[in-house]
Image (cartoon, helix red, strand yellow):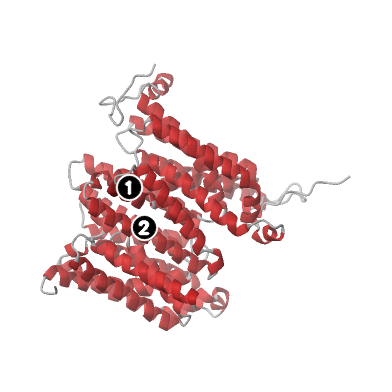
Amino acid sequence: MLAHEFVRNAYLAGTGVAVACGLVGWFTVLRGQVFAGDALSHVAFVGAVAAAVVGVDERVGLFALTLGLAAVMAGLGRRARADDVTIGVIFSWVLGIGVLLIAVLSTSGAGGEGLIVASTLFGSIFGLGAGQSVAAAAIGLGVAAVALAIARPLLFATVEPELAGLHGVPVRTLGLALLLLIGLVTSEGTQAIGALLVLGLIAAPAGAALRLTAKPYLGMGLSVAIALAAMWGGIALSYALPSLPPSSAIIGLAVGAYALARVSTIAL
Amino acid sequence: MRRPLEAGVWPMSNPTLSWNLVSDVRELFAYQFMVNALEAGTIVAVMAGVVGWYMVLRRQSFAGHTIAVMSFPGAAGAALAGVPLALGSYLACGIAALAIGRSGGAAGRGRGGESAAIGVVQVGGLALGFLFLSLYGGVLEQLDTLLFGTFLGIDRDQVLTLLLVAVAVLTALALVGRPLLLASLDPEVARARAIPVRALRVGFLLILGLAVAATSQITGALLVFALLVAPPAAAQALTPRPALSLALSVAFALLVTWLGLAIAYYSIYPLGFFVTSLAFGLYVLALLARAARRRAAAGPSVDARAPAAPADVLSYRPRPTPTA
């Protein structure tokens, strides 16, 4: 299986995505910001379509839009946490713009709009080139490193925001930083598993880890481990069963891990 | 005068806008497909205005969004199974509503745990939808429609189904409306008055699921939100009175839908863009109006006894009636 270059690329990119999603996702779930992550990941596809309309690299649009929207959300919310009405309203508007852009793209005669929409919505991890995979892995590890670096103050600011503020921890800046990290992870993950499904790697492994343990660093490690297992297992599964799309296999495993964690903690 | 038209066929190559507004508006009603769209849009707007009002009040936008996107795997699954797409949508939305309803409340791991559970339900459904889609293989051309909707080619049966669903949803809400309002504003007091808060929670999610599944037939799975969130949020920003803001919410939803349909008719660009943009603009205007009123209220008041305007409906408490 590993003799194929596209499988090696998938594993390389997938590992970076999974590590970053597992780590950033742990904080996202802890802070109850999954909806923000959801909005950021869904608008990622609008960024990709916008880039196609303008005629620049898809990644430029992806990163510009998600990071921009993350900053807007942080600016609108208290303590850089936007409330769910604000997220919902902005998010639906950006999707509406996405619809317009798809129409522009299809009337401009550039063609292939259906392909762009489908591959950004659901990803195509087996279609990544060597350069894209290396970039995805590098971004993933970079995001993970930043997340680890700010883990302590971010944890403090999450659990005890008032107290952290009194101790001089920059609560707002940390909130913004986390949203920006979520934006980075979702744009990176969009190419691999798609704008609609990347949320699964953010929410499911972290949700499972937070159910299994309350210890912060153990939880983060567990979350990354589950995300990696889902990613590696999903790629292998989809390679073995060609009719099973890789994104569905990866997310299926992650959701299964979450369900197992729920059942086991209820049974105990 | 209505001319019969085959569903889904654009009636003419280029509808033009004249300066005569009356004839422009009359032209909107000239074609059966447009009459169907306006009727369906009106039904959907009233339903979304009411159900969305409760959803925004209860801060359940994430749950609403998740249930809304479930109509996509539902439709994809139905295509695979060879049953009507709408049936799949309703079923999937109902199942998602139950799953979310079960996951919250008793599990009680705070907001974080709940939002993770909703997220997992959502991606689980979407992953299944993608699997169905690739197993089916042929529906991809309709992917845009499933996700972003269309107002072309709505037939009489669909309008009738929408009407029935809307009547069911609004009747159910009328029955539980008052206890649901209290349970949303103040769950503690509601529990003390023996209102079944948990059952209401699941019940409301089911109502939401039904309304969202119906709405997504027209607006698509991703754009239901334009009608469900922005009009109620704008209404709640404008007035703290429940009845008034509920009425405003419906009025806003109707305004957005009618204007959006009219503009989309004369434009080559999709309805979804106009509806979401109008809704967004309305919400921003409402926020600006509220900010202006707050500034006025915070300034030197002529009547020192006048209370400051309450923030929103969450802080609304009925004034005690003066006793003789």
In the image shown, does A73 or B305 lie closer to the viewer? A73
Residue B116 in the image: x percent, y percent? 44, 66
Amino acid found under the numbered disc labelled 2 = Gly
Q: Chain of mark 2?
A: B
Q: Residue at x 10, y 74 (%)?
A: A3
Q: Residue at x 53, y 69 (%)?
A: B107
Residue lying at the far right in this picture: please name it.
Answer: B324
Q: Is residue B247 above or below residue B112?
A: above
Residue B188 in view of the camera: yes
Instruction: State if disc 2 and disc 1 touch (CB < 8 Å).
Output: no
Residue B146 in the image: x percent, y percent? 33, 45
Residue A181 in view of the camera: no
Amino acid found under the numbered disc labelled 1 = Ala
Q: Image quadrant of residue B264?
A: top left
Q: Is residue B109 above or below residue A100?
A: below
Q: Chain of mark 1?
A: B
Comes first in the chain, label 1 or label 2:
1
Residue B125: give its label. 2
Q: Secondary structure at mark 2?
A: helix
Q: Which residue is mark 1?
A: B78
Question: Callout 2 environment at 10 Å: few (<14), some (14 to 19), or many (20+)?
Answer: many
In the image shown, does A247 or B148 lie closer to the viewer? A247
In the image shown, does B100 or B283 lie closer to the viewer? B100
Residue B47 in the image: x percent, y percent? 51, 40
Q: CA distance from mark 1 to mark 2?
A: 14 Å
In the image shown, does B26 or A240 lie closer to the viewer? A240
Q: Secondary structure at mark 1?
A: helix
Q: Residue at x 51, y 53 (%)?
A: B205
What quarter of the picture does the C terminus of chain B occupy?
Answer: top right
